[in-house]
Image (tube, rainbow, N blue to C red):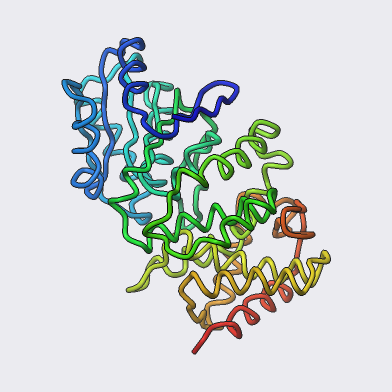
C-alpha cells in the first residue's frame, strides 16, 4: 500500500482494508453512515462489506448522476441523517464517484455544523481528482459546483478493485483528469500516459501516484484557490459549460469527455495567446481526438455557453478566467479571453470533429 501524507489527512492507495478497519476502530464514532447511489449500492457496497465484515452502518441511497447533484438531493441526505439520529460524533463514508464525494462531503460539512467524513472513491475520475483537495459542493441554477465549502476529509482510501466495476467509457473519463495533471505540471507524466493503449488492461496503480502528487503539491501550496490552484481548472472553463449544455440532451457527456473538449479549445487558445507551440498543440489534439468522442456543438448554443462561462466561480471583474499552457507541463493562470476569442476556439473544435 502507498500512502500520500497531506497536511491534515492521508491518502491510502492499494490494499486499504486493514488500514480502514483500524481507522474505524480507533475513531470510535457513535454512528457510521455510508452514502451510495443506486449504482454503487449494487456494484461497490458488496465489495466494501466483503472486506469489512461485521461493520454496522446505516445506508443512505441517492439517485446516480450529475443531474441529481443539487440541493433537493442534499435535503434527502440531511433528512436521512436526522431520521437515523446522527449526532456530531457520527461519520459519513462517501462510497462512490465524484458526485457522491462532492455532495456527501458538502452534506457532512454542513450537517449540525459539521460531522466527519471519509472518501472511498470508486471511479478513476474521483480517485485522481475529487478525492484530494477538500473542494465540496453542488450545482445550482446550471452552474457547476457553485454552492459549496472547503473542508478536508479525515482520510481517503483508494482501491483500484472498484475500477473493475466501470465501463471503458467511465475509465476514459477519469483519464482526462490525469492527462490534465500532466499537461499543467508534469510533462513526463503526460508522456507516460501517451503510451497507454488498452484502458481495460492498464494497471492504474502505476499511474495514480504521479497524478495525485501533482494535485497534492498544488493544493498544499494554495488550499483555497487564490493562486496556483487555478491551474487545475485547465479545460474546465469551457468544459463545464459544455458538460452543462449536454446534460439535458438524450446523450449527456461524461465529465471527462466534456473536459477533453475544454482542453482542446483551451489548448488552441494557449497556442493563439501565450505561445504554446504548434507541435505541442497538435500532440494534444491528436491524443484527445484518438481517445475521446467527437461531438459537434451547434453554433446556436454558443451564446448559451458564453453565458454559463460568465457565471463561472473563478471569474473576476467580469472577465472570463482561463488557465493556459505555455508548454506541456507549464501552466499560466489568470489568463482572460474576450467573447470572440472563445467563439473562435469553439469553431476550431468543431473543425476537428470527424463528421
- In the image, 279 versus 79, the foreground residue is 279
Q: Is residue 6 above or below residue 259?
A: above
Left or right of 193, for residue 226: right
Residue 293: percent from left, percent from top: 46, 74
Is residue 321 visible in the rendered image? The answer is no
Left or right of 170, for residue 274: right
Residue 337: percent from left, percent from top: 75, 66
Residue 128: percent from left, percent from top: 50, 45
- In the image, 62 versus 95, the foreground residue is 95
Residue 41: percent from left, percent from top: 21, 43
Q: Who's the residue at 55% across and 71% down the image?
A: 304
In which quadrant is the N terminus drawn?
Answer: top left
Left or right of 235, for residue 293: left
* Numbered label tally: 0
- In the image, 45 versus 29, the foreground residue is 45
Is residue 282 visible in the rendered image? The answer is yes
Q: Who's the residue at 72% across and 50% down the image?
A: 316
Q: Is residue 29 above or below residue 160?
A: above
Q: Quadrant of residue 344?
A: bottom right
Q: Is residue 161 above or below residue 301?
A: above
Q: Who's the residue at 35% across and 72% down the image?
A: 251
Amino acid at each position: 500500500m502507498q500512502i500520500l501524507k497531506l497536511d491534515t489527512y492521508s491518502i491510502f492507495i492499494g490494499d486499504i482494508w486493514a488500514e480502514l478497519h483500524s481507522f474505524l476502530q480507533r475513531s470510535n464514532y457513535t454512528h457510521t453512515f455510508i452514502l451510495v447511489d443506486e449504482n454503487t449500492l449494487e456494484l461497490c457496497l458488496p465489495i466494501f462489506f466483503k472486506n469489512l465484515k461485521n461493520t454496522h452502518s446505516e445506508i443512505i441511497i441517492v439517485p446516480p448522476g450529475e443531474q441529481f447533484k443539487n440541493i433537493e438531493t442534499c435535503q434527502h441526505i440531511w433528512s436521512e441523517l436526522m431520521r437515523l439520529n446522527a449526532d456530531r460524533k457520527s461519520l459519513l463514508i462517501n462510497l462512490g464517484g465524484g458526485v457522491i464525494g462532492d455532495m456527501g462531503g458538502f452534506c457532512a460539512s454542513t450537517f449540525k455544523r459539521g460531522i466527519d467524513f471519509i472518501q472511498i472513491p470508486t471511479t478513476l475520475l474521483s480517485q485522481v481528482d475529487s478525492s484530494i483537495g477538500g473542494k465540496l459542493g453542488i450545482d445550482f441554477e446550471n452552474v457547476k459546483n457553485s454552492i459549496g465549502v472547503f473542508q478536508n476529509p479525515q482520510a481517503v482510501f483508494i482501491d483500484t478493485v472498484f475500477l473493475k466495476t466501470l465501463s471503458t467509457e467511465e475509465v476514459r473519463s477519469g483519464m482526462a483528469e490525469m492527462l490534465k495533471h500532466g499537461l499543467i505540471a508534469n510533462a513526463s507524466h503526460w508522456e507516460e500516459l501517451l503510451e497507454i493503449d488498452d484502458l481495460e488492461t492498464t494497471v492504474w496503480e502505476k499511474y495514480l501516484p504521479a497524478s495525485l502528487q501533482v494535485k497534492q503539491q498544488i493544493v498544499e501550496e494554495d488550499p483555497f484557490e487564490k493562486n496556483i490552484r487555478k491551474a487545475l481548472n485547465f479545460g474546465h472553463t469551457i468544459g463545464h459549460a459544455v458538460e452543462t449544455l449536454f446534460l439535458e440532451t438524450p446523450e449527456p457527456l461524461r465529465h471527462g469527455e466534456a473536459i477533453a473538449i475544454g482542453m482542446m479549445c483551451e489548448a488552441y487558445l494557449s497556442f493563439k495567446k501565450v505561445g504554446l507551440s504548434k507541435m505541442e498543440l497538435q500532440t494534444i489534439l491528436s491524443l484527445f481526438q484518438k481517445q475521446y468522442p467527437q461531438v459537434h456543438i451547434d453554433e446556436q448554443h454558443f451564446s448559451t455557453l458564453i453565458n454559463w462561462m460568465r457565471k463561472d466561480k473563478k471569474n473576476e471583474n467580469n472577465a472570463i478566467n482561463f488557465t493556459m499552457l505555455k508548454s506541456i507541463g507549464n501552466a499560466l493562470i489568470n489568463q482572460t479571453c474576450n467573447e470572440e476569442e472563445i467563439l473562435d476556439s469553439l469553431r476550431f473544435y468543431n473543425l476537428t470533429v470527424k463528421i
